[in-house]
Amino acid sequence: MKTLLLIRHAKSSWNDPEMDDFDRPLNKRGKQNAPEMATRLLSRGVVPELIISSPAKRARTTARIMAKEWKYPKEAILLEDELYLCYASTFLKVITKIDDDFNNVAIFAHNPGITDFANYLTEEIRIDNVPTTGIFGIEADTEHWEEFDRAKKRFLFFDYPKSEGLV
């Protein structure tokens, strides 16, 4: 079995309208939500063995904050250029390259791609929007990431900072 966590970056700052989108930092709320959501995953007993992130500052920073809560070394976070503002189909390209030694993987990325990809993966629920620091979890019945797309999948959960309870 392979477990995939799709995590949207935490809330970013729009204080400087001249700043390039790629370089936007997290705002105060984003810096609070990231460790909170990492702790929620810990309470579920879900800890990624591999973290892959968009290189954009807001995604990279979210991954680092959450990695710290999981005691995952920040230098081991893989930055994948293709994840910056990607389409849903790009996630599959990234996933098929994951080493099969890893069973629990977290990917940090952006909307609209992350919402589109979550909806592609399951028909159990329909997600209108993965909010900032939202986490979508799914399990695939396979031993090989290369077969992830064709494998039978089971929706695990969808959680985000303002949720009243886990879906």
Image (spheres, grey):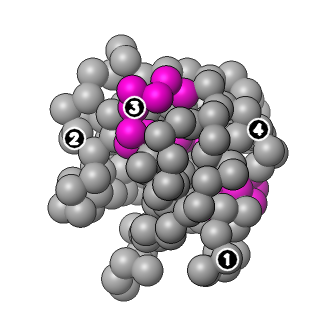
Residue 61: give x, y in percent of width and height.
44, 33
Q: Earlier in the sequence, mark 3 or mark 2?
A: 2
Give the structural element (helix, strand or loop) at label 3: loop
Q: Which residue is drawn at 63% across and 34% down?
A: 146
The residue that mark 4 highlights is 90
The three-letter amino acid code for the residue at tag 1 is Glu
The residue that mark 1 highlights is 123
The three-letter amino acid code for the residue at tag 2 is Glu
Q: Residue at x 53, y 41 (%)?
A: 108
Q: Earlier in the sequence, mark 2 or mark 4?
A: 2
What is the crowding at mark 3: few (fewer than 14 residues within 10 Å), some, or many (at least 20)?
some
Q: Distance between the residues labelled 3 and 2?
A: 19 Å
Residue 154: give x, y in percent of width and height.
50, 67
Of the two numbered discs 2 and 4 in the rendering, the one whose residue sits closer to the viewer: 4
Q: Which residue is drawn at 56% across and 36% down?
A: 145
Q: Which of marks 1 and 3 is nearer the N terminus?
A: 3
Q: Can residue 70 be seen in this view?
A: yes
Give the structural element (helix, strand or loop) at label 2: helix
The residue that mark 3 highlights is 102
Q: As drawn, is 92 to the left or to the right of 37?
A: right
> Marks 4 and 2: in contact by CB < 8 Å?
no
